[in-house]
Amino acid sequence: MSVFPPVRRDRIIGQLPQCFRKDAALHTKEEFNNKVKTACQEQRTGTVGLKISKVIVVGDLAVGKTCLINRFCKDAFDKNYKATIGVDFEMERFEVLGVPFSLQLWDTAGQERFKCIASTYYRGAQIVIIAFDLTNVASLGHVRQWLEDALKENDPTAVQLFLVGTKKDLSSPAQYSQIERDALRLAQEISAEFWAMSSLTGENVKEFFFRVAALAFEANVLAELEKSGSRQIGEVVRINSTSNSLYATSKKKELNCCR
Ligand SMILES: Nc1nc2c(ncn2[C@@H]2O[C@H](COP(=O)(O)OP(=O)(O)OP(=O)(O)O)[C@@H](O)[C@H]2O)c(=O)[nH]1
Ligand SMILES: [Mg+2]
């Protein structure tokens, strides 16, 4: 008998959720990797079903990190700002291609005075989400610093990186297209997948977290297959080695500067 509660019906992922922008994506494939699909069908996903992948959400104070997590996990939105003190976390259980998969979402403090507490929780992250406010250019300017801090505690080559613009409901179309241009350029430079969303309206929030869960799951299954000597089903698989992976060759080089 499973010790976990059943997965919610609205957390079931049967198809690969698509990226937001093809020019700033971790990969642009339309479907899950074939080796992953086969492994799931044949129930050869090893320990992935028992794993909990750690996700950290970082970024300037008041950019909307807590609201983002609350919109997805609780379908709630609070217009009053309450600073996160240190960290907080939520667990989210998914079923991906029939296999249970969990994300532990760590909501961290953006305020300078709480940063040193929060940064002690960065370690062991598989996914780093850097949030900035689409109506605040300075918050986009601080993204590289957040990246550097997050990667100090983690293996840059193992981390999947997302750059998320928040508060889309507050930006005018002209303001949005200007900041999106800069954000796309930065996302490409740091090998991150770019998304824009609103926690107030919920626009793109569920799509984004489904994409995060799916890509984290895919990477975990590929790693598991590699670990268990996947020669039975073909040659050894390397994560990020497909031609569709936009950042396959640039990732290591780019991220070394942030160590
Ligand atoms: N209009 C609008 N307001 C938002 C949105 N997301 C967050 N806010 C508001 O922005 C303020 C800050 O949101 P938080 O989620 O608390 O920000 P935070 O990044 O967690 O801040 P720290 O915990 O201090 O790092 C709050 O007043 C929210 O209501 C959004 O999508 N649209
Ligand atoms: Mg917060």
Image: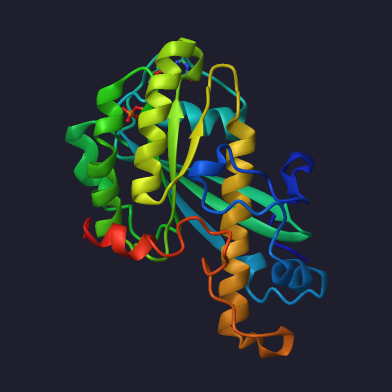
Q: Residue at x 68, y 50 (%)?
A: 94
Q: Is residue 150 left or right of residue 10?
A: left
- Viewer-side residue, 120 vs 48: 48
Rendered location of residue 20, percent (x, y): 58, 37
- Viewer-side residue, 94 vs 147: 147
Rendered location of residue 251, percent (x, y): 38, 60
Rendered location of residue 142, percent (x, y): 24, 35
Which quarter of the rendering shows the C terminus? Answer: bottom left
- Viewer-side residue, 122 vs 250: 250
Would residue 170 be visible to someone looking at this image? no
Q: Quadrant of residue 80?
A: top left
Q: Quadrant of residue 124?
A: bottom left
Query: Residue 188, relative to residue 59: is it above or below?
Result: below
Query: Residue 174, relative to residue 66: is it above or below?
Result: above
Q: Residue at x 46, y 63 (%)?
A: 248
Would residue 13 be visible to someone looking at this image? yes
Residue furthest left as drawn: 113
Q: Is residue 84 left or right of residue 37?
A: left
Rendered location of residue 129, percent (x, y): 42, 44
Which quarter of the rendering shows the N terminus? Answer: bottom right
Q: Is residue 257 left or right of residue 254?
A: left
Q: Residue at x 33, y 23 (%)?
A: 62
